[in-house]
Image: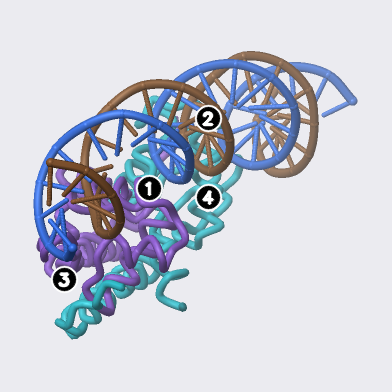
Chain colours: A cyan, B purple, C blue, D brown
Amino acid sequence: MLISTSIDRLSIFADPLRTEIIRLLADEQLCTCHLVDMTGARQPTISHHLKILRDAGLVETEAVGRNTYYRLVPERLEEYSGILLALSRRAKSASKERHPCA
Amino acid sequence: MLISTSIDRLSIFADPLRTEIIRLLADEQLCTCHLVDMTGARQPTISHHLKILRDAGLVETEAVGRNTYYRLVPERLEEYSGILLALSRRAKSASKERHPCA
DNA sequence: TTCTCTGTTCAACTTATTTCAAACAATCAC
DNA sequence: GTGATTGTTTGAAATAAGTTGAACAGAGAA
């Protein structure tokens, strides 16, 4: 089902460090070095999670000299929000009947 | 920050089997035995994930004879949806300024 | 060019999750 | 009562995911 694969995409929010990065980027654009300072994690770790976020389309990058700035993509967050809202509506209109046991 | 802890709650959707259970419950109430049949997973595995979903308040139970029926709690899904929508709005109104590097 | 700085990729290690069989509890039918 | 059914809990094994230092690549400065 389409909804199944959609919900699965929410696993992007499964890691605490990743959600911290997302929270920080919600306020301002930051480059990798900032995120290293702000989170206390090592550079390869931050880079690893940024790649996951990039692949998911949740963040965009912009190279500025030697630095790489990251920013959130609000539209993608809306999309994820919509997945859950649709699921909620589906659950509300779901049959109140109980599937009989064999 | 409050938002950080909120986003972290989305890790409930991290596991594929858990999302499959959620998807199945979005259409109708089901008991453990149905979920075992429908997913192909063993009973303890299903029971384990149902406990996680119960603890998160995402599903409710009702005992019917020997069976235990599970159903989704739409309000909780709406809540999760709202977390992401709020984050999206915050990202939209975030400063376009780039944090300068040291 | 050479050096420095920023960031990514790689491979090994570590840690957290998931899964399973077995044991257990509770309910219904007989 | 006994036996069968449904479901949870437990503890160990298997699997998946995150973290790390070291190596690597590219851009800017001297």
CA distance separating discs 2 and 3? 40 Å
Q: How far apart are labels 3 and 1 at the CA level?
A: 24 Å
Q: Which residue is mark 4?
A: A52
Left-right relation of D8 to B33: left
Which residue carries the number 1 mark? B45
- SS label for mark 2: helix
In the picture of the structure, the residue carrying the numbered disc 2 is A43
Name the residue type under label 1.
Thr
Neighbourhood count class around disc 4 (C-alpha, 10 Å): few under 14, some 14–19, many 20 upward:
some
Question: CB of mark 1 within 8 Å of CB of mark 4?
Answer: no
Q: Are marks 1 and 2 in contact (CB under 8 Å)?
A: no
Q: Contact (CB < 8 A) between labels 3 and 1?
A: no
**On the rendered structure, is A43 left or right of A15?**
right
Amino acid type for the residue under numbered disc 3: Pro
As drawn, is C15 to the left or to the right of D28? left
- Count residues near mark 3 (Cα–Cα under 10 Å), then give few for <14, some for 14-19, many for 20+: many
**Viewer-nearest residue: A83 or A52:** A83
Residue located 46% across and 51% down the image: A70
Which quarter shows the C terminus of chain B? top left
Residue B97 coordinates in the image, percent (x, y): 35, 53
Residue at the spot of label 3: B74
Q: Secondary structure at mark 3?
A: helix
How far is mark 4 from mark 3, CA to CA? 29 Å
**Mark 3 or mark 1, which has the lower sequence index?**
1
